Image (tube, rainbow, N blue to C red):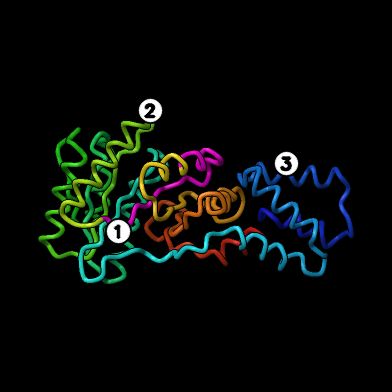
Amino acid sequence: MALFSKLIAKIKGENSFAPTDWAELEIELLASDLGPTLTRDLLEAARRVKSENAQEALAQALTSHLTQKSRLPIINQGGLSVVLVVGVNGTGKTTSVAKLAEHIKASGASVVVAAGDTFRAAAVEQLQTWGTRIGVEVISGKVNADPAAVAFDAAQRASAMNVDYLLIDTAGRLHNKRDLMNELEKVKRVVEKITPICEVLLTIDATTGQNGMAQAKIFSASVDVTGIILTKSDGSAKGGIALAIESELDIPIKWIGTGESTADFESFAPESYIRGLLT
């Protein structure tokens, strides 16, 4: 069931809610990962809604909490566009790199990928497998190689190849947050000795709830996150974290992944997302 369909059904069915109805609704919204601030704002909006325009009014209330920043990719016109993909291990980061590479290739642009998550041999192998499957070159180093060295080499090679895009996968270990952020900052510094980084995309697992918000805060405080890839999401039930992140951090969700295949990846469409929450 869509996140707000039950609310709309209640508004249309009766003129007023009992206190227990509002309490039940608040619990449901909090359980859907909207967070306390956004939940409070939406409940206040719902109290002002009239039954005949419930869906439209709630759609406007939800939309008002989305960022106004552009969701378009940030590119280097006429040059190499470098995209750094960051996130905690297990959020679908490496798979999202491959999906984004396939999407770029399908658009007619050229792309290479750097396997910068060198501390996980499985991540490098995963990217290499994806690269073979979709016909994209994957630049990698030795196991446990310095991620910044791999990224630097990849930036040099991508520039020499005159490709349109370089996507860089990164490590996502959060057991020591400062070390991870120092590492990401180093990767960014060495790459920018060769070419500017256009985007830093953060992968957030939609099923992790408010933990996803905590991750977004950590990364956005340390690196200049320009957009979010929301993974493992069907765009409806339990999808409130997308609204919460945009409302609180003002970071646009640019891509959404709903499955394991490259076809399960597309640009984030806020209108469709809101519609999915309401119907």
Residue positioned 75% across, 53% down in the render: 44
Identify which residue is drawn at 85% across, 43% down: 20
Q: Is residue 86 left or right of residue 82?
A: right
Alpha-carbon distance for marks 2 and 1?
28 Å
Q: Earlier in the sequence, mark 2 or mark 1?
A: 2
- How far across and down, in percent of the image, does residue 187 sit? 24, 44
Which residue, given by chain and number where applicable, does mark 3 sit on? 27
- Which contiguous range is marked in magenta? 197-215
Q: Is residue 206 magenta?
A: yes
Q: What is the count of numbered marks? A: 3
Which residue in the protein does label 1 denote?
198
Q: Amino acid at mark 1?
A: Cys
Q: Nearer the viewer, residue 103 or 26?
A: 26
The answer to whether the residue labelled 2 contacts the one labelled 3, judged by CB atoms less than 8 Å apart, is no
Assess disc 1: are there few (<14), some (14-19) or many (≥20) residues with their C-alpha within 10 Å of its C-alpha. Answer: some
Q: Position of residue 251 (x, y in %)?
A: 47, 54
Q: Nearer the viewer, residue 122 or 56?
A: 56
Task: Work out whether residue 42 can be spotted.
Answer: yes
Mark 2 vs mark 1, foreground winner is 1
Residue at horizontal 30 percent and vertical 65 percent from the top:
75
**Which disc, if any, is residue 175?**
2
113 and 41: which is toward the camera: 41
Q: Secondary structure at mark 2?
A: loop
